[in-house]
Image (cartoon, rainbow, N blue to C red):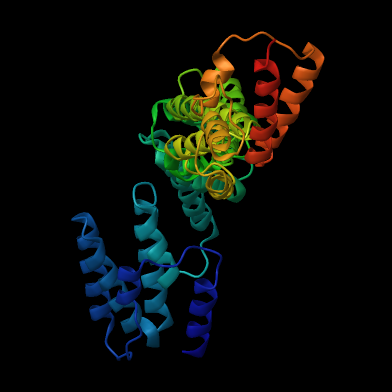
Amino acid sequence: MALIAKSRDDVLGREHETVPPLFASLFSDRPSVNVDWRAVDRAIDEALGCLEEDCYVGALGKFREAWTLSAARADLREKVHEAAIAAAESLVEHNWRVAEALLLETTPTADALWAEIASRKRADAIQLALDDAGRVDRDEYLPHVRKRLAEMVSLYPAEARLENRLAALDALLAERVAEDREKNLRRLYLFSDRLDYSENAETLRRFAELVKPFAGPYQDDRDFAVVFDGVRELQATLEHAEALLEESRPRDCLKVCNDALEKRPNNVLFRRLEEKAKGREWVSLLAQGTVDRARAFQAQAQYAEALGEWESLRGIDPHYPGLESEILNCAALSERSGGLSAKEQVAEAVQESEFVVLADEQAEIEPLPSLVDRPRANSLPLGIRISMTEEAWNHFKTGLAATGALLLVVLVLASHSQP
């Protein structure tokens, strides 16, 4: 019994595929029993009958029974060996798996038969791999089939059919990869072009994230990188233009927008920003004109007029730098001058002074505007009159209206006195 068990273990230790689980369960060890040769013959006959009916599970079961019953007699066991080999030889051409199961259990030495089974096993495995590779109808299965075929090439390195099919499959995969790349590159170009018609700047900022499902694997590809770099440059340019507008530099913003629109003339975001910058530039020019007029009035000590210009600037550009301090300063100067215009200041100063122009003994005080506007014979030299006029005007500009009025009165009296 020990020798039989050892021979059985040696056979099971061969470098062959293991017995299928269903068959292995039929060959589980059972306690042997002593029976006569008739029981063994009957088990063999029933096994052969099952094989004739293609009942392989039943045949294996009966051969296992005969093997167990013959354990005590070498002649009976040899009979079981011969029957199993004959059965395996008849099966190997169309069902080498059942033949292998019979040999694994009952015949430790049958080299020629084992070689036949190994050859048929190899042929079936190769054909199965070739058939699987030829039946691929969906591209997503190609990598899996290619991996399995590569394993078969490693297992059977001398098989030219496998190598040729693997090369053909690699070429097909390369073609599919190239097609996918072109398709995804076209999608990326289309998505990039559509950015020009999007009014949502967030779409531009999230471009890489939005195209990641189909373009993410290609970011190191030169053609894809050009598109990504272009979009990143577009985003940076837009942010720069927006920052210039926030810094109240509409003219610089317009230049950036114009440069961007030369490259992407249909871009909605830059068109909209360009319109906004033009509006800001117009406001800036209007505001600058108002500021210039206000400062001109202040230079002429016309504080009431200057204050009016500064106040109007509030409605044009309420965020003009230093606007509030300019208004407060001009209001203080206007209040110091009584809130009157320059012409009104001169008239008031003349009326409040002790100097009057008398046409005759009953003449009344005559307002300065009428004195100035009325043609008179000039008794003073022209150079002196010009010098006195400039000095009087300088007094008015510095807030010394009374002194300026005094000089004007002297000038008018001197001009009014005639022989």
Q: Residue 237 at what x, y percent from top left?
A: 59, 34
Q: Nearer the viewer, residue 219 or 386?
A: 386
Q: Is residue 404 above or below residue 9?
A: above
Q: Residue furthest front?
A: 361
Q: Residue 296 at what x, y percent from top left?
A: 62, 29
Q: Is residue 379 above or below residue 347?
A: above
Q: Residue at position x 55%, y 35% from top?
A: 345
Q: Is residue 75 left or right of residue 281?
A: left
Q: Is residue 92 left or right of residue 359?
A: left
Q: Residue at position x 51%, y 79% from top?
A: 9
Q: Is residue 299 above or below residue 9?
A: above
Q: Residue at position x 69%, y 40% from top?
A: 398
Q: Residue at position x 39%, y 52% from top?
A: 92
Tell me if I can see residue 162 in this picture: no
- Where, by quadrant of the figure, is residue 334 drawn? top right
Q: Nearer the viewer, residue 196 or 6?
A: 196
Q: Is residue 386 above or below residue 106?
A: above
Q: Residue 196 at what x, y percent from top left?
A: 44, 26
Q: Nearer the viewer, residue 226 or 390?
A: 390
Tell me if I can see residue 288 in this picture: yes
Q: Residue 358 at what x, y percent from top left?
A: 57, 24
Figure quadrant of the C terminus: top right
